[in-house]
Image (cartoon, rainbow, N blue to C red):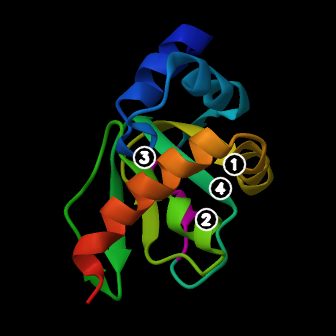
Amino acid sequence: MLRKNAKIELLRTVALFSGCSKRELGEIALIADEIDFKPGKTLITEGRPGRQFYVIIEGEVDVVQNGVQLPRRGGSEFFGEISLVSGTPATATVTTTTPTRALVISKRSFTTLLERSPTIQMRVIRSFSARLAPHVI
């Protein structure tokens, strides 16, 4: 299990939280649960409402979007934030391919965090916008 400081250091590498202060990362670390998944576990299903946000600590996942297999992804990648922030269905299916350890934040905890901290909310929205910008016409 990661200690709080190790969670903070991991969260610091996640683009979605870039620019967050150590105190803000500490707030995020407090609501993130560390969970182990076996290979073949579907974390997110395209077209379904999002329930959780994932940050991969160790392991790899397959991502399928609109029936197209995207490159395999691993450490410090994150998934599920679009659905949690926008309220829209998930944009891809994410399935573990190896034993995978991830930080998991529930929709309720993530929403409460953003409502409670306008600073974190703005940082997440900026990162979120930057991630989506290449896909917007």
Q: In screen coordinates, is 76 left or right of 52?
A: left
Question: Residue 52 shows which numbered tag?
Answer: 4
The residue labelled by disc 3 is 16
Q: Quadrant of residue 131?
A: bottom left
Residue 44 located within the stretch drawn in magenta: yes
Question: Under tag 3, what secondary structure?
Answer: helix
Q: CA distance from mark 4 to mark 3?
A: 15 Å
State which region is magenta: 38-45
Q: CA distance from mark 3 to mark 2?
A: 12 Å
Q: CA distance from mark 3 to mark 1?
A: 13 Å
Question: Residue 12 shows which numbered tag?
Answer: none
In the rendered view, tell whether residue 36 sits above or below residue 115.
above
Question: Under tag 4, what secondary structure?
Answer: strand
Amino acid found under the numbered disc labelled 1: Leu
User: At which x and y percent is residue 130?
Assistant: 32, 61
The residue labelled by disc 1 is 114
Asked if the residue at tag 2 contacts the one at tag 3, i.e. Cβ–Cβ closer than 8 Å, the answer is no
Q: CA distance from mark 2 to mark 4?
A: 11 Å
Label 1 or label 4, whichever lies nearer to me, is 1
Asked if the residue at tag 1 contacts the one at tag 2, i.e. Cβ–Cβ closer than 8 Å, the answer is yes
